[in-house]
């Protein structure tokens, strides 16, 4: 069975966004979790997908132009991720969205469809986010692993990654990596 792996960048106090609605401490939105070799699909919530599609389409279309979230030119890792996702199927969990610009985008309407995706042959699935989608899939028992990159700051007010989780979840630490700039990559199994 394919694993569903959530990957998120958070502050030490578990925030994925600051009070202004952005994670202004994140310098690049590349896939820094080491997932590319083991995934062949991405899953996002309907609230996150339009911005995600716009951000990466901008990088794919004009790789020398500063990206709208960071204001910086894309990093080499972001350019690599942009090429990877251009050929990678994306699934969007939404009851309202019905169209996407990317041709390899499909819509799933419920948890049972995500459970069925995990049963299909293939590599693992990267749960890109957002926070509500990650929390609901975690509560439904569909997330198999969580990969976090923790930034060395306390964001204070803002959106907590697991704010909408309805129940307690035990995690098993599988790996810790120290990254440049005081960041730490944590890999947890669920349960």
Image (cartoon, rainbow, N blue to C red):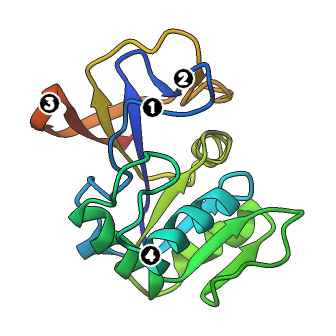
Q: Is residue 121 visible?
A: yes
The reply to whether callout 1 and callout 2 are in contact (CB within 8 Å) is: yes
Residue for point 63% across, 73% down:
91
Q: Nearer the viewer, mark 1 or mark 2?
A: 1
Q: Do the numbered discs 1 and 3 sit on residues whose CB atoms are within 8 Å?
A: no
Residues at marks 1 and 3, CA–CA distance in whole angstroms: 15 Å
Numbered disc 2: secondary structure: loop
Other-residue count near label 3 (Cα within 10 Å), few / some / many at <14 / 14–19 / ≥20: few
Q: What residue does disc 3 label?
A: 181
First in sequence: mark 2 or mark 4?
Answer: 2
Most extreme residue toward the right, as rendered?
96
Instruction: Tell which residue pokes out farthest to the front in this image.
Output: 65
Residue picked out by circle 2 = 18
Q: Nearer the viewer, mark 1 or mark 3?
A: 1
Rendered residue at 48%/33% (across/down): 23
Residue at 44% x, 70% y: name it.
Answer: 59
Instruction: Give the distance between the C-alpha atoms of the residues marked 3 and 4, in whole angstroms.
Output: 28 Å
Q: Along the polypeptide, which appears first: circle 1 or circle 4?
A: 1
Residue identified by numbered label 1: 24
Tell me if residue 40 can be seen. no
């Amino acid at each position: 069975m394919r694993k569903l792996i959530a990957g998120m960048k958070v502050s030490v106090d578990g925030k994925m966004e600051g009070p202004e609605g952005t994670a202004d401490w994140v310098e690049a939105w590349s896939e820094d979790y080491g997932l590319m070799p083991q995934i062949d699909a991405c899953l996002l919530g309907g609230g996150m997908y339009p911005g995600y599609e716009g951000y990466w389409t901008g990088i794919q279309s004009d790789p020398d132009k500063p990206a709208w979230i960071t204001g910086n030119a894309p990093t080499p890792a972001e350019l690599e991720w942009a090429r990877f996702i251009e050929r990678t199927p994306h699934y969007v969990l939404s009851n309202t969205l019905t169209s996407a610009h990317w041709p390899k985008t499909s819509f799933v309407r419920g948890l049972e469809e995500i459970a069925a995706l995990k049963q299909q042959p293939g590599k693992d699935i990267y749960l890109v986010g957002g926070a509500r989608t990650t929390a609901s899939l975690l509560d439904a028992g569909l997330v198999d692993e969580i990969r976090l990159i923790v930034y060395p700051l306390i964001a204070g007010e803002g959106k907590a990654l697991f704010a909408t989780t309805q129940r307690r979840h035990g995690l098993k630490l599988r790996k810790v990596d120290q990254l440049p700039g005081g960041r730490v990559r944590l890999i947890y199994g669920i349960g």
